[in-house]
Amino acid sequence: MWGKNHVPRFSFIVGLVTRNAITTRDKQLQWGRITQANCPLCDGGLETSDHLFFQCSYSAQIAACGIGLNWFNHCFWDAALTAACSNNSSNTTAGRVRGIVWSLVIAHIWYERCRRCKGEPALTPAAVAQRIYKEISFLVCGKPELEADFGEVKLLRV
């Protein structure tokens, strides 16, 4: 998440998410700020961090677009964070890319959630995945829309 290849705006979001410090609708409901706590992405369940990133059908569609993560192997943050920290050695190119991808996926799911909460037009999962892919290509290769293969991490064009 942090290191010489991190992007502060994405790392900040990931830091909040991993500490369960984002203001999800379940928290807002407990505080009495809202009366409905449905997920704004899928409208299918109570919006919690675990739901938003691991159980939401919208997030699953983003992960299924060939981003390069086995995103839904874990159902809860504790397991996912442990796996991410153990697999993202910043000493290897694949580890650095994996860390960048992980940060970008989390941040872009959160950004889309916030867009919808503000009443902005919804993006399709493929459109969000395309944005993620372009950012990855630019951050890793310095050029947008390159197909890249970094050992264990294969990024596919969406």
Image (cartoon, grey):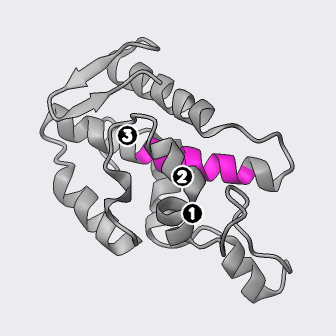
Q: CA distance from mark 1 to mark 3?
A: 17 Å
Residue 126 x %, y %: 57, 33
Q: Nearer the viewer, mark 1 or mark 3?
A: 1
Q: Earlier in the sequence, mark 2 or mark 1?
A: 1
Q: Which mark is residue 37?
A: none
**Dot 2, crowdedness within 10 Å: few (<14), some or many (≥20)?**
many
Q: Is residue 74 left or right of residue 118?
A: left
* Magenta part, dominant SS: helix
Q: Residues within 10 Å of mark 1 (few under 14, many from 20)?
A: many
Type of amino acid under label 1: Leu
x then y, percent, for residue 103? 42, 46
Asked if marks 2 and 1 touch (Cβ < 8 Å), the reply is yes
Q: Position of residue 83 (x, y in %)?
A: 24, 62
Which of the pair 30/50 is nearer the observer? 50
Q: Is residue 16 visible?
A: no
Judged left or right of residue 122, residue 53 is: left
* Residue 106 magenta: yes
Please provide the residue range marked out in magenta. Answer: 103-114
Name the residue at 45% across, 60% down.
Answer: 15
The mark nearer the N terminus, 3 or 2, is 2
Write down the residue under mark 2. 59
Disc 1 target residue: 52
Q: Are marks 1 and 3 in contact (CB under 8 Å)?
A: no
Label 2 sits on what residue type? Answer: Ser
**Residue carrying label 3:** 101
Report the residue at 82% width, 39% height from top: 121
Helix, strand or loop at label 1? It is helix
Q: Is residue 103 above or below residue 4?
A: below
12 shown above or below 63: below
